[in-house]
Image: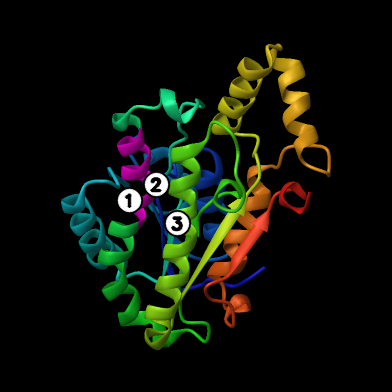
Amino acid sequence: MGDLTGRVALVTGASRGIGSATARALAAAGARVIVTDLADTAALAADIGGLALRQDVTDEAQWVTTIAFARAQAGGLDILVNNAGVLQHMAPVTELTLEEWRRVNSVNVEGVFLACKHAVPALAERAGQWSGGAAIVNLSSVAGLVGFAGSVCYGASKGAVRLMTKCLAMELAPLKIRVNSVHPGVIDTVMGGEVVTAVGAASGVGDNDARAQVDQMHPLGHMGKVADIAEAILYLASDRAGFMTGSEMVVDGGLTAR
């Protein structure tokens, strides 16, 4: 898909699911990968020949530390994948609390903002080495494109990521930093399981029937796999996507085509 030899990538929320699969895909393409999460990523880093760091993406001071770590331990930064995110408790807007609104947006929106704010100088330092420049890939969602009942703050957060991506693409193009967003459908991960549970609760059905309902939300008839998203991110991070910035890559089994 793309040769990333010589490049340094940072993947947040890398302890499981899409983040872990992305770290493995980038490493397999030749990148040296820094994996961060609140959970321990040391085993993953050892497995892929990368580096691990515990990080809360909502803490600005930790972003300063993370970028300094990338410079000191890996020589800089070429690729930033903002994957860390949380799903809201599925509920009507009248039942959501301000605390939950702030929690979801703190991780999903402020975490991306802080990442870009502090990573851009490091990305700009090395962007000229690569024909496609440096790359930021932000994980949004189909919920950042279309509405879902009971998903007000999650949808708002992912919609914000979508528009932040476009604004950053305009701002950072002169620095040879490309910025694109990926919009997964429901992926078969722990978070995808939370969606299944929420659908089951709303429909009053068991897990098997709820999973069937979620599968059928996608015209292809099934949820996505983490590899589907990791391959999309790998493409956007590579020089093969060198003429793409401000774009939305939708990987949703046709869900938003309905």
Q: Does the magenta portion include 103?
A: yes
Q: In which quarter of the image is the N terminus?
A: bottom right
- For residue 147, what is the image quadrant? top right
Ranked by sequence position, the earlier of labels 3 and 2 is 2
Q: Would you call the spot at circle 1 few (<14 residues within 10 Å), some (14-19), or many (20 or more)?
A: many
Residue placed under numbered mark 3 in the picture: 161
Q: Considering only vertical position in the picture, is 73 above or below 204?
A: below
Q: Does the magenta portion include 210?
A: no
Under mark 1, the amino acid is Gly
User: Is 92 on the left or on the right of 66, as rendered?
Assistant: right
- For the point 44% across and 39% down, the residue is 153
Q: Nearer the viewer, mark 1 or mark 3?
A: 3
Under mark 3, the amino acid is Val
Identify the element where label 3 is drawn: helix
As measured in the structure, the alpha-carbon distance from the residue carrying label 1 to the one carrying label 2 is: 6 Å
Q: Would you call the spot at circle 2 few (<14 residues within 10 Å), some (14-19), or many (20 or more)?
A: many
User: Is 119 on the left or on the right of 163, as rendered?
Assistant: left
Render colour scheme: rainbow
Q: Magenta residues: mostly which secondary structure?
A: helix
Instruction: Give the camera-side residue of 97 and 57.
Output: 97
Tell me if I can see residue 40 in this picture.
no
Identify the element where label 1 is drawn: helix
Q: Would you call the spot at circle 3 few (<14 residues within 10 Å), some (14-19), or many (20 or more)?
A: many
Looking at the rendering, the stretch of residues picked out in magenta corresponds to: 101-112
Instruction: Give the camera-side residue of 169 and 31.
Output: 169
Instruction: Give the camera-side residue of 156 and 240.
Output: 156
Residue placed under numbered mark 2 in the picture: 108
- For the point 20% across and 52% down, the residue is 60
Under mark 2, the amino acid is Asn
As measured in the structure, the alpha-carbon distance from the residue carrying label 3 to the one carrying label 2 is: 8 Å
Task: Tell me, yes or no, whether the two marked residues, 3 and 2, touch with CB atoms within 8 Å.
Answer: yes
As measured in the structure, the alpha-carbon distance from the residue carrying label 1 to the one carrying label 3 is: 10 Å
